[in-house]
Image (cartoon, coloured by chain):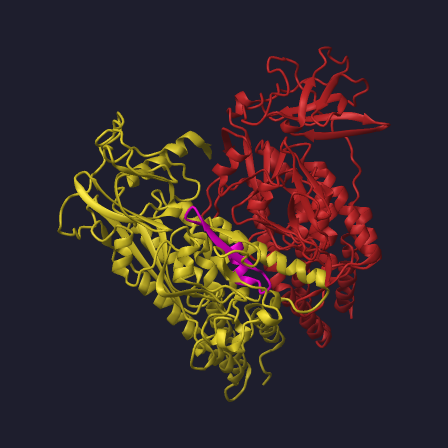
Chain colours: A yellow, B red
């Protein structure tokens, strides 16, 4: 395979430029890793007194700033005659210039020679439901709920993403709402936020490629992946980290991965530090991949890690110490002695030994791009209310089929194992009957192995009291040898 | 996770693993013809063995010992090549590939120099025959759960794929590493095969997804290290598991030996020894970046940047690895990797395989096949032994005329065990506590007992 970088750049830039032509109808979304963008031309001619905002990806919007806060700016502008008012996070912006006072020549609908004319958004109040409408962005929804690492697992996710690819999705909206209840332990209520599911990060390393590397490799026109967090607790908290587009529900939370130091309790201290450091190396890498500051992950995982922040230029600046001035805010303390979270703080989910991200703090720290309480609101935020079309994908069916199948497997395996033990030699107990009994046992073992193989990524046979695949294989070998040893009865 | 074995075994393996630095090129530089000036001020007189893309393989004498080493373009200040042909030079095979233009390299040799190379091994085919882009291959060391050093990647398996790499005229080998560590015993053999057998033939780089413990120590002899965005590298404390999730660290003489071993391996990769030291023990690490951009390292907290505090063991993430110039860049995929390596064009050799994010060359196919067989054997080891043991017992309990079928089962199981060890000789001491060369005696003992069983 011969790879020419120049050709790859051209293939990748064109869809980016296409995206930028619809600028102004939604927040500027960060580009996928590895994509190099060319700065986009202005979408409207600047006039005296116009305000100009420039994004970190080079995109520029000219209009009138109507509102500005410490972290956001709202600008009113028009593109191809369509008025729009959009709020952007300052973390996305390179500069804000107010009232330039000069007019710059700008192409009305800039095109280069040889480039196809870009489709401009239609000024049409009716929402098109035609999935073949080239002006519409196709949106695929993937809901991840259930137990992380079991119901939420890479095989059904992969099937859903492949379904999205067949439907040519432009956006994949991952709605993450994992089961953080005690039901799987036969109890009512929720697992406490300060309980830790840190060790589940290994499972994220199985799932992450489905949403990142595999999409990079297999899709010609790569979709934008967006996470909407309702609940990302335990190992699920790591899953969105490699995605640069995260939104929170107002009651959303991301955490339950604290107390990493409790994952290794025995042995020499230097070995403890090695093992803990290696684990943290993995999860810091997840944050780096998504473009987030890895210190946030340290605050979420290490009890004695002290982190504060202050806002500077609309962006958080992290400080690995307690606040030392009024403009600095604490995130976590060292969790020792007097700083250890007490019952009142824990009961109110206000503990700060380890950080649990809620909607507001996630937005402030730049993890979240916004807080939305409904799917429609999310579509509006993404500029897809009018220009998006919801695909009839099979994600729900696929996730449900996996969940149902896994649940069934967990019930079926102990029953099959019991049946293996219950196989009896039928009367009169001769060679044919003994052979039939052995064949029956082997058939049951084969069935067990088939189930275990299908769900091996999410199933722990020992946890449900049955032998694993390899042990079953050994049993089959013993049965074969017993059969070899047996002989037809002499008359 | 590292394991440690008896001192006797360690010594035997150390003896087996020691490889002196040897020249693999002939003729030896009986007279100093070429002069290599390095940026650190050193000047070497010897002979250019090979050149490629600005990289120079140079052979010179250190006392009576002939030494060959590869120098990257960024280390070379100037190369003066002798204009006189040595009278007994081996006939040139093919003209050297012209170094491709790379952003951060200076041409190390005049491209108009028509003097052909005189390698002892077959030179890479000329650029004009293979195309202008250099031929590169990704070789995966560890994947998913199959990542233990010494089990799923071994010196022996790396050595076995070299002919396949040469067959496909590979010039650059990138080891894509994803491993949580493994056997300390395999460290030196792996380092030796990479340093002594790969580096003289190929440009070698490491591309890190995860290199923890023995995996990082294996990569450490490689100068060119690139990280994936999620990459992590370090955590190299040697220990024995305590069975409760933690471990007992190497101490005293054993610790000093492995610290010294890694100082030498650091030198192979031209990495400051201070870095690996902080990856092995709880030693502070700081650095200062001077006005030239050079990084100076200290095993204390006096430097400008505190990289690792006193009470921690260092594991780099990708950002810090690049920030402190331990790694040369971050690459999410092979296109970014090629650019980071300074290529404007590169031919990643191999075919597309579903589920694999890079082309799979023949050597990579072999490594994947090796890992698959190891994984299968690992799963079925108990089954092999049960088959042999049960069939043997049944044979013993049967009249002589009936033993044949059980002995056949024993032989079938024995042959599976033999193939398992042949595929990965490390199974010999992991399972049988015997050196690989002694495993055949175990097999002979089994064959003898089966022969006796047959005769009775």
Residue A370 in view of the camera: yes
Q: Which residue is at a point 77% across and 67% down the rendered structure image?
A: B455
Tell me the magenta residue range: A295-315
Relative to B360, is B169 above or below?
A: above
**Horizontal side, residue B241 vs residue A312: left or right:** right
Q: What residue occupies the far right of the structure in this picture?
A: B64
Relative to A408, is B308 above or below?
A: above
Q: Nearer the viewer, residue A107 or B263?
A: A107
User: Residue B399 appears in which quarter of the rendering?
Assistant: bottom right
User: Residue B1 appears in which quarter of the rendering?
Assistant: bottom right
**Horizontal side, residue B437 vs residue A314: left or right:** right
User: Residue A267 appears in which quarter of the rendering?
Assistant: bottom right
At which x and y percent is residue A285? 53, 52
Relative to A395, is B194 above or below?
A: above
Residue B405 in view of the camera: no
**Horizontal side, residue B96 vs residue A175: left or right:** right
At which x and y percent is residue B124? 61, 26
Give the total number of marks visible in the rendering: 0
Q: Which residue is at a point 67% across and 35% down the rendered structure image?
A: B199
Q: Nearer the viewer, residue A161 or A198?
A: A198
- Residue A307 is one of the magenta-drawn residues: yes
**Horizontal side, residue B18 vs residue B140: left or right:** right
- Quadrant of the frame with the C terminus of chain A: bottom right
Q: What residue occupies the far top of the structure in this picture?
A: B84
Q: What residue occupies the far bottom of the structure in this picture?
A: A427
- Residue B43 is one of the magenta-drawn residues: no
Q: Nearer the viewer, residue A333 or B436?
A: A333
Q: Nearer the viewer, residue A440 or B143?
A: B143
């Amino acid at each position: 395979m011969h790879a020419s970088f120049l050709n790859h750049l051209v293939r990748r830039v064109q869809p980016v430029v296409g995206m930028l032509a619809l600028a102004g109808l939604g927040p500027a979304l960060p580009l996928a890793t590895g994509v190099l963008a060319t700065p986009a031309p202005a979408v409207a001619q600047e006039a005296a007194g116009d305000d100009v905002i420039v994004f970190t990806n080079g995109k520029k919007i000219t209009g009138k700033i109507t509102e500005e806060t410490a972290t956001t700016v709202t600008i009113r502008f028009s593109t191809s005659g369509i008025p729009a008012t959009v709020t952007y996070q300052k973390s996305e912006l390179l500069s804000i210039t107010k009232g330039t006072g000069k007019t710059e020549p700008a192409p009305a609908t800039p095109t280069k020679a040889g480039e196809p004319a870009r489709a401009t958004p239609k000024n049409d109040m009716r929402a098109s439901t035609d999935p073949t409408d080239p002006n519409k962005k196709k949106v695929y929804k993937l809901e991840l709920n259930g137990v992380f690492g079991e119901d939420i697992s890479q095989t059904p996710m992969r099937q859903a993403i492949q379904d999205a690819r067949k439907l040519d999705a432009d956006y994949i909206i991952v709605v993450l709402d994992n089961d953080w209840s005690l039901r799987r332990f036969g109890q009512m209520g929720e697992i406490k936020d300060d309980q830790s599911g840190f060790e589940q990060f290994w499972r994220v390393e199985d799932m992450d490629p489905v949403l990142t590397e595999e999409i990079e490799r297999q899709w010609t026109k790569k979709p934008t992946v967006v996470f909407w967090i309702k609940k990302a607790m335990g190992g699920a908290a790591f899953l969105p980290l490699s995605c640069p587009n995260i939104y929170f529900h107002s009651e959303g939370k991301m955490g339950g991965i604290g107390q990493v130091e409790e994952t290794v309790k025995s042995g020499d201290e230097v070995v403890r530090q090695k093992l803990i450091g290696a684990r943290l190396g993995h999860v810091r890498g997840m944050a780096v991949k998504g473009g987030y500051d890895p210190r946030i992950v340290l605050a979420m995982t290490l009890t004695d890690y002290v982190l504060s922040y202050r806002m500077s230029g609309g962006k958080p600046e992290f400080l690995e110490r307690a606040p030392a001035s009024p403009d600095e805010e604490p995130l976590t303390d060292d969790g020792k002695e007097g700083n250890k979270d007490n019952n009142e703080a824990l009961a109110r989910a206000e503990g700060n030994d380890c950080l649990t991200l809620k909607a507001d703090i996630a937005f402030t720290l730049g993890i979240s791009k916004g807080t939305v309480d409904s799917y429609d609101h999310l579509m509006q935020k993404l500029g897809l209310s009018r220009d998006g079309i919801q695909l009839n994908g099979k994600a729900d069916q696929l996730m449900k089929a996996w969940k149902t199948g896994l649940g069934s497997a967990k019930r079926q395996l102990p029953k099959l194992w019991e049946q293996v033990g219950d196989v009896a030699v039928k009367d009169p107990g001769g060679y044919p009957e003994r052979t039939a009994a052995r064949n029956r046992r082997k058939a049951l073992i084969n069935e067990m192995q088939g189930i275990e193989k299908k769900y091996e990524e999410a199933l722990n046979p020992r946890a449900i009291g049955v032998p694993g695949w390899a042990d079953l294989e050994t049993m089959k070998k013993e049965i074969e040898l017993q059969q070899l040893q047996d002989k037809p009865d002499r008359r | 996770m590292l394991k440690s074995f008896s001192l006797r075994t360690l010594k035997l393996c150390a003896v087996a693993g020691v490889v002196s630095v040897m020249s693999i090129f002939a003729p030896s530089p009986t007279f100093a013809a070429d002069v290599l000036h390095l940026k650190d001020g050193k000047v070497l007189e010897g002979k250019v063995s090979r050149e490629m893309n600005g990289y120079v393989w140079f052979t010179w004498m250190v006392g009576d010992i002939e030494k060959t080493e590869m120098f990257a373009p960024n280390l070379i200040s100037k190369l003066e090549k002798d204009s006189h042909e040595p009278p007994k030079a081996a006939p040139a095979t093919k003209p050297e590939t012209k170094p491709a233009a790379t952003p951060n390299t200076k041409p190390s040799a005049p491209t108009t120099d028509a003097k052909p190379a005189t390698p002892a091994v077959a030179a890479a085919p000329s650029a004009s025959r293979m195309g202008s882009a250099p031929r590169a291959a990704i070789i995966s060391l560890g994947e998913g759960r199959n990542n233990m050093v010494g089990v799923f990647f071994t010196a022996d398996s790396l050595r076995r794929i070299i002919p396949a790499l040469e067959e496909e005229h590979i010039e650059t080998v990138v080891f894509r590493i994803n491993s949580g560590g493994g056997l300390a015993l395999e460290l030196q053999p792996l380092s030796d095969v990479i340093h002594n057998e790969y580096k003289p033939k190929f440009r070698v780089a490491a591309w890190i997804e995860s290199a923890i413990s023995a995996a990082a120590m294996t990569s450490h002899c490689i100068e060119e290290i690139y990280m994936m965005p999620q990459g992590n590298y370090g955590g190299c404390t040697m220990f024995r598991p305590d069975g409760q999730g933690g471990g007992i660290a190497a101490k005293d003489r054993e610790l000093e030996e492995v610290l010294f071993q890694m100082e030498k391996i650091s030198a192979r990769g031209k990495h400051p020894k201070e870095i690996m030291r902080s990856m092995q023990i709880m030693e502070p690490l700081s650095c200062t970046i001077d006005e030239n951009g050079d990084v100076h390292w200290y095993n204390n907290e006096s430097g400008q940047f505190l990289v690792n505090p006193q009470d921690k063991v260092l594991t780099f993430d990708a950002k810090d690895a690049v920030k402190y110039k331990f790694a040369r860049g971050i690459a999410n995929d092979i296109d970014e990797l090629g650019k980071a390596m300074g290529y404007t064009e590169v031919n990643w050799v191999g075919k597309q395989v579903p589920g694999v994010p890079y082309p799979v060359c023949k050597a990579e196919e072999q490594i994947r096949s090796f890992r698959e067989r190891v994984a299968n054997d690992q799963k079925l080891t108990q089954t092999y032994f049960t088959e042999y043991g049960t069939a043997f017992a049944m044979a013993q309990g049967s009249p002589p005329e009936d033993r044949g079928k059980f002995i056949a089962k024993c032989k079938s199981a024995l042959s599976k065990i033999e193939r398992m060890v042949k595929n990965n000789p490390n199974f010999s001491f992991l399972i049988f506590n015997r050196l690989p060369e002694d495993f055949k005696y175990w097999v002979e003992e089994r064959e003898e007992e089966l022969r006796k069983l047959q005769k009775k």
